[in-house]
Amino acid sequence: EAQVTQNPRYLITVTGKKLTVTCSQNMNHEYMSWYRQDPGLGLRQIYYSMNVEVTDKGDVPEGYKVSRKEKRNFPLILESPSPNQTSLYFCASSTRQGLYGYTFGSGTRLTVV
Amino acid sequence: GIQVEQSPPDLILQEGANSTLRCNFSDSVNNLQWFHQNPWGQLINLFYIPSGTKQNGRLSATTVATERYSLLYISSSQTTDSGVYFCAVGGRQGGSEKLVFGKGTKLTVNP
């Protein structure tokens, strides 16, 4: 089944403790990206990657890092999480130029206390 | 950047009713999708529809790209249709290919 897999689905952590949210896709898509969803602010892009070893900032990149060492994986790294990073996170993938649409993962609900 | 407006923001229906959700966008796009966010937060892809008309069971969608709007039709609504419906458009913006989401329509279907 074609899908984007995120882990974990739920995570509660403490301020400053480094964490990684994993994202993997099995569709051989070139393009991958991360979004966060917050009440009143909607979904906003954090980082994106056009292909292996090519990443760039989205609209809200502060406090996040990403890497794209393999085509299928695009982890999101929070080196020193803060409470304002409490949010619902989504990973998405597509072919270049979004042809045939974007496929989203099931989401990761992160709480930073 | 591209602006996406959805209407209405909230919609309450009785089970069995029909509804139309609208999405207006401000510029030409090469991608338009409708999503349903269920109560567990998952984004379910309903349609990839940059132009034309598609149908999937009780749901159908039409995009008129030249007039920059899309419509999502829900017929014979069921309580499981409740949730938030998002329209998202994509195009090359400042070198980034990304989806811009509308604020959504919150649909409540009562039994």
Image: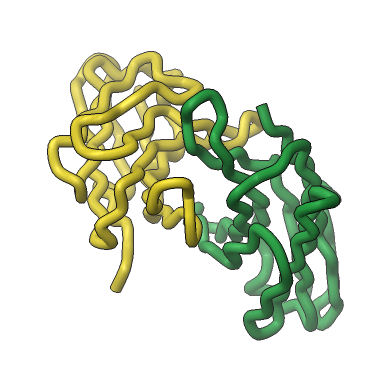
Chain colours: A yellow, B green
The residue closer to the viewer here, A26 or A19, is: A26
**Left or right: B41 in relation to A63:** right
| Residue B37 in the image, given as x and y percentages of width and height | 57, 56
Q: What x and y, as percent, mark residue A2?
A: 31, 68
Residue at the outermost left position: A69
Q: Find residue A27 and report its image quarter.
A: bottom left
B61 in relation to A95, above or below: below
Q: Is residue A109 left or right of residue A11?
A: right
User: Which quarter of the picture shows residue B72?
Assistant: bottom right
Q: Quadrant of the N terminus of chain B?
A: top right
Asked if one can make out residue B11 in the rendered structure from this viewpoint, the answer is yes
**Residue at 80% across / 59% down in the picture?**
B64
Q: Nearer the viewer, residue A90 or B65?
A: B65
Above-or-below relation of A62 to B70: above
Q: Residue at x 78, y 71 (%)?
A: B73
Q: Is residue B65 left or right of residue B39?
A: right
Q: Quadrant of residue B55?
A: bottom right
